[in-house]
Amino acid sequence: MDAGWSRNGVNGFWARMTALASRPVLGFRFWDTTFDGADPPRRAVGAVVPFWAVAGLFAVLPSLWGRGALRRRRRAARVRRGLCAACGYDLRGARGGCPECGSARVGEVPV
């Protein structure tokens, strides 16, 4: 076997990476090493990212979208029931805007 290959990969690559990996911090591990035996010397850089970090990252945008959708749904339900879209005050007997918060009635053109 030549070119630095051995039974366990490139000079025992995974064994070295496991030994050289920095101490894990919250599940994250990083390493950077150089194989001097190769010509030219080769560098290996790696990182291990825990599943919880990836899942959390991909959960942020859907949760923000869901929050906005819930707000739009509540606002539409208030308008259908004759309530102020901003504060929920009962506007069935009120003229013009909302006497509670001062916002204009949805669907009404100001004069």
Image: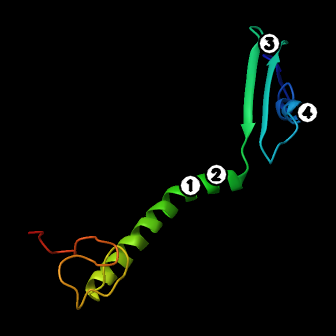
* Tags 2 and 3 touching, CB below 8 Å: no
Q: Nearer the viewer, residue 8 or 44?
A: 44
Residue drawn at 29 percent across, 71 percent down: 102
> Gap in Å between the C-alphas at discs 1 and 3?
40 Å
Disc 4 designates what residue? 19
Q: Position of residue 65 (x, y in %)?
A: 44, 62
- Give the percent coordinates (x, y) of residue 32: 78, 25
In the image, residue 63 sits, relative to residue 45, either above or below, namely below
Q: Position of residue 9 (x, y in %)?
A: 81, 31
How much space separates mark 2 and mark 3, taking CA atoms?
Answer: 35 Å
Q: Secondary structure at mark 4?
A: helix
Report which quarter residue 34 is drawn in.
top right
How far apart marks 1 and 4 lie (CA) works out to 31 Å
- Report the amino acid beneath label 1: Phe
Residues at circles 1 and 2 in contact by the CB criterion of under 8 Å: yes
Q: Position of residue 24 (x, y in %)?
A: 85, 42
* Kind of element beneath mark 1: helix
Q: Amino acid under label 3?
A: Ala
Answer above or below: position of 30 versus 66. above
The quadrant in which residue 49 appears is top right
Q: Which mark is residue 12?
A: none
The vertical placement of 61 against 111, above or below, is above
Type of amino acid under label 2: Val
Tags 4 and 3 touching, CB below 8 Å: no
Label of residue 38 in the image: 3
